[in-house]
Image (cartoon, helix red, strand yellow):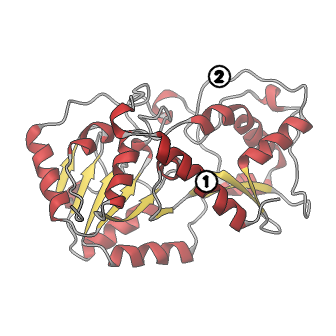
Amino acid sequence: MFSARKLSGVCRAIRVHHFRSHSVSRISPNLAFVPACLPPDPVEVEELQRFVSNSKRLFVMTGAGISTESGIPDYRSEGVGLYARTDRRPIQHAEFVRSASARQRYWARNFVGWPQFSSHQPNTAHLVLRDWEKLGKLHWLVTQNVDALHTKAGSQRMTELHGCTHRVFCLACGDQILRSELQEHFEALNPTWKAEAFGVAPDGDVFLTDEQVRNFQVPACSKCGGILKPDVTFFGDTVSREKVNFVHQRLAESDSMLVAGSSMQVYSGYRFALAAWEKKLPIAILNIGPTRLDHFASLKLNSRCGELLPLIVVHDPTR
């Protein structure tokens, strides 16, 4: 088993590898799950440039819309999100905890989808935000995503608000392992089990029938025999008070807020925008389609994150 410290070390190793292997200029977007939108308007580009230039300690919150250009679908995008394409809904926390069959279904779907999901790479928007951090423009990044793409891009001043699918922990004893290690356990327990997927979901799983998952075997915690769960906040669960307080502290140190790729429909993220508004911080939104914040945002832009963010110039203060 991996300790939390070892997990942190592995994440740093992933971060360094991807930091060295990516450059902003050669990342091609995957637009299969990106809603249609017009190219950035020059006036809007200038407005966002002014907003970012005036910010000294920028607080950034990202959502699923920043990762759609990496080929990961989201839930709510018009025409291409999960809710628009199917009647399927993500698993609820209570269902996962109380139902062995629900856990079997979840892990079978996740097992099939993991090789593809874990191979997704950061896109231009992730790399731009990494560079803003290196240049001292971005004070803190909070992502609602669980895909580890900001970590792969090299971001360090960051909180994963809803956790990360690359980690798994035991509900009983709290022991943590890497999701890649769990994949090996699945393979050992299910050497002859195979299933063909019928579609891709946002959080790393795929669509399978009940018949397909019937014989799938799920391992228990090797230390105590407890239930293994991805280190993510499922729908119906809550973000820890410690993490919420930490993010509020980072927001209190900031002078402006940028929301990128999120409709902010989920309260766990929306509360921080409310706090920024109450502190009278200027708020800019970059998202295709309406958001819950539109009525009190200083600036609202309907563009792809990976298309607009690279147009913003941030100077190196040491030069």
In terms of depth relative to the viewer, which is nearer, 210 or 278? 278
Q: Is residue 48 left or right of residue 226?
A: left
Q: Quadrant of the C terminus?
A: bottom left
- Residue 130 position, x and y percent, is 39, 53
Q: Quadrant of the N terminus?
A: bottom right
Q: Which residue is mark 1?
A: 13
- Disc number for residue 39: none
Q: Earlier in the sequence, mark 1 or mark 2?
A: 1
Q: Quadrant of residue 287?
A: top left
- Disc number for residue 198: 2
Classify 65 as above or below 8.
above
Q: How many marks?
A: 2
Q: Is residue 11 visible?
A: yes
Label 1: element kind: helix
Classify 257 as above or below 15.
below
- Residue 268 position, x and y percent, is 47, 63
In terms of depth relative to the viewer, which is nearer, 109 or 48? 48
